[in-house]
Amino acid sequence: MSPDARPPYLYFLSYPRAAFDEHLRGFYEDLEREVRVHAPPGAVRSVNAEPAAMGFFDQEGLERGSDWPAELEGALQECCCFVALYGPAYFARGFAERELRAFEARRNAAGVPPRHVVKPVIWLPNYNVPDDLSHLQFKVGNPQALENVKGLRALKKLPNDPEYKKAYETAVEALA
């Protein structure tokens, strides 16, 4: 592989714009770190021999003046996994849901089971999943586990609570 060639993004982080805050950015940074630790050597991304993002996150992956729709479409076409941060605005606003549907269409066309490549995460509770997407499992383990009841944002927001911190770290490592 040439020094400026890079493997595809390992994941695409999808979230509604209304959910963006310092906790979401922190989650992305934590996920990046864990993915880099667990990625096979050939999957570690670099550009011009410098480390590059493992996942596509539009707050990092788009430069000023970029063709936003084309960049998103390209990242959706090349990424290996789709991480969807479910919350009240995820299915209400349109863009995030369209990203999920585009990835689902690509996954269906390739015949890949969703459990291998689609990773819905409860970011904020109180959301409504459309019936045709309800087959995507989004609760992990015990339905009463903190990440399933409170959402990962609540766990990220309270890092000084040992129970929340442990649940958050375990969830992020499991995603990676």
Image: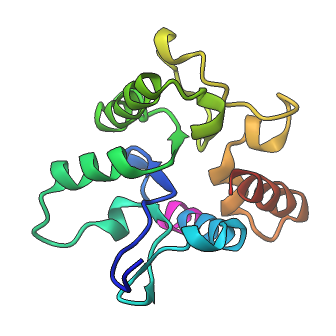
Q: Residue 47 appears at what percent x and percent y?
A: 37, 82
Front one among 103 and 150: 103
Magenta stretch: residue 112 in it? Answer: no
**Displayed quadrant of residue 141:** top right
Say whether residue 18 is visible: yes
Q: Does residue 142 appear to the left or right of 119 in the view shown?
A: right
Front one among 69 and 123: 69
- Give above or below for 125 relative to 71: above
Q: Does residue 119 appear to the left or right of 174 in the view shown?
A: left
Q: Residue 102 appears at what percent x and percent y?
A: 34, 31
Q: Residue 146 appears at what percent x and percent y?
A: 81, 43
The span picked out in magenta is 21-27
- Give above or below for 102 relative to 164: above
User: Which residue is pictured at 45% across the width and 22% down the height?
Assistant: 108
Q: Does residue 35 appear to the left or right of 17 in the view shown?
A: right
**Displayed quadrant of residue 40:** bottom right
Q: Quadrant of the C terminus?
A: bottom right
User: Which residue is pictured at 42% across the width and 35% down the height?
Assistant: 89
